[in-house]
Image: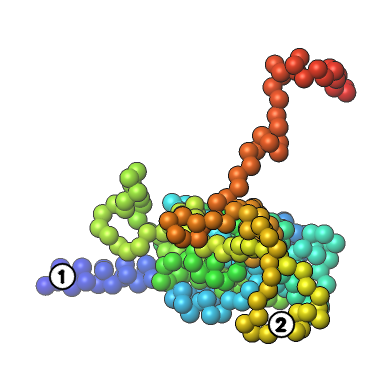
Amino acid sequence: MVSIEAQSILRRKAALGTQEHEARAMSVAKAMRQSIAKLGKELFEMPLSAIGAITEDRKASDLFKLIDDASLLCLLEGEDGKVGAAIIGADIVGGLIQQQTMGRVSPVSGTTRPMTQTDAAMCAPLLDALFERVAPMLEVKAERDVVGGFNFGARFEDVRTLEMALELPEYFVVWLTLDLSGGARQCELTLVLPRTGPAKTSDGLSDGEDVGPSIPQMNEVVMDLPTELNMVLCKVKLELSQVKQLAVGEALHLPHNTFPETEIVSLTGATIGSCVLGQVSGIRALRLKRVSVHATQPRRREADLAELDLPEITALP
């Protein structure tokens, strides 16, 4: 009886010691706050601090409701094909760009603009350095497995594209409220990270039992994204007075033999190709016009120089 009671007391003491150690251990939020302050000085030579840091497990459906297209939406690539996201507030993006280009951060003007690839490229060093610094600081292995190994991958065009890339039902989320240049700007940086999944074997299957959906590889995510294209069969020029007189059901006279010049146009209005309208087995079809690369970008071998009857040109020193 005494032996059993002694073992029970030892177990309680060991459990209490473990809880106290984990309470004193470096948490993700604390590591993020310390790292942000150092990175502001090292990367941007300005005061940068995390005045707020919250970590939680959150359902993806609840998370996406809080994201708007005005933020910079970034893809995070991790080890073993893990996919996460970083949502950087527009005020943070503008402040980082101002500091890198003009050497100072001005207060928010109130005007917003669409995010670009240049914005993502100038914010990427902060994300890469943050993950590289934070992971080794964590003492709990489970937290190191979640945070470690991530870096900037690409920019999402909109929230819908981000939703399609993050397919897991729940994610580990870090909410950081950043302060730039001593209060000049304040905004949120949100990190959305997947929980660590089982390692994949060479045949693409997970070791052990099936534990849920696997995290898609980057190429799988990109190739599964939908792409919308418009086919412009014909263009007709009308005067504004004629357009105002158009009525429902009215027929327009199209120029003769214009369908062979059908254009393929993206949603932004850029023409990316051409095709011919026809039919296959009674169904309307488009045949793409393919132009050989050599027809537009001819290349010559050095052995063909004599046949071209061109003079030899000596390179400048």
The color scheme shown is rainbow
Residue at x 68%, y 36% (from the top left corner): 295
19 or 61, which lies in front? 61
Residue at x 25%, y 58% (from the top left corner): 209
Mark 1 neighbour class, 10 Å CA radius: few under 14, some 14 to 19, many 20 or more: few
| Residue 18 visible in this rendered orientation of the protein | yes
Residue that protrudes farthest toward the left in the picture: 1
Q: Amino acid at mark 2?
A: Leu
**What numbered label is drawn on residue 246?**
2
296 or 72, which lies in front? 296
Q: Is residue 62 left or right of residue 253?
A: left
Location of the C terminus (image quadrant): top right
20 or 146, which lies in front? 146
Residue 314, compared with residue 189, is above or below; it is above
Q: Is residue 207 left or right of residue 61?
A: left
Mark 2 neighbour class, 10 Å CA radius: few under 14, some 14 to 19, many 20 or more: few
Question: Percent from the top left, x then y, of residue 27?
Answer: 50, 67
SS of the residue at dot 2?
Answer: loop
SS of the residue at dot 1?
Answer: helix
**What numbered label is drawn on residue 214?**
none
Q: Which residue is mark 1?
A: 4
Residue 196, compared with residue 51, is above or below; it is above
How many marks overall? 2
Q: Amino acid at mark 1?
A: Ile
Separation of marks 2 and 1 at Cα, in angstroms = 94 Å
Q: Quadrant of residue 240?
A: bottom right
Question: Percent from the top left, x then y, of residue 178?
Answer: 67, 72
Question: Percent from the top left, x then y, of residue 253?
Answer: 69, 70
| Residue 262 visible in this rendered orientation of the protein | no
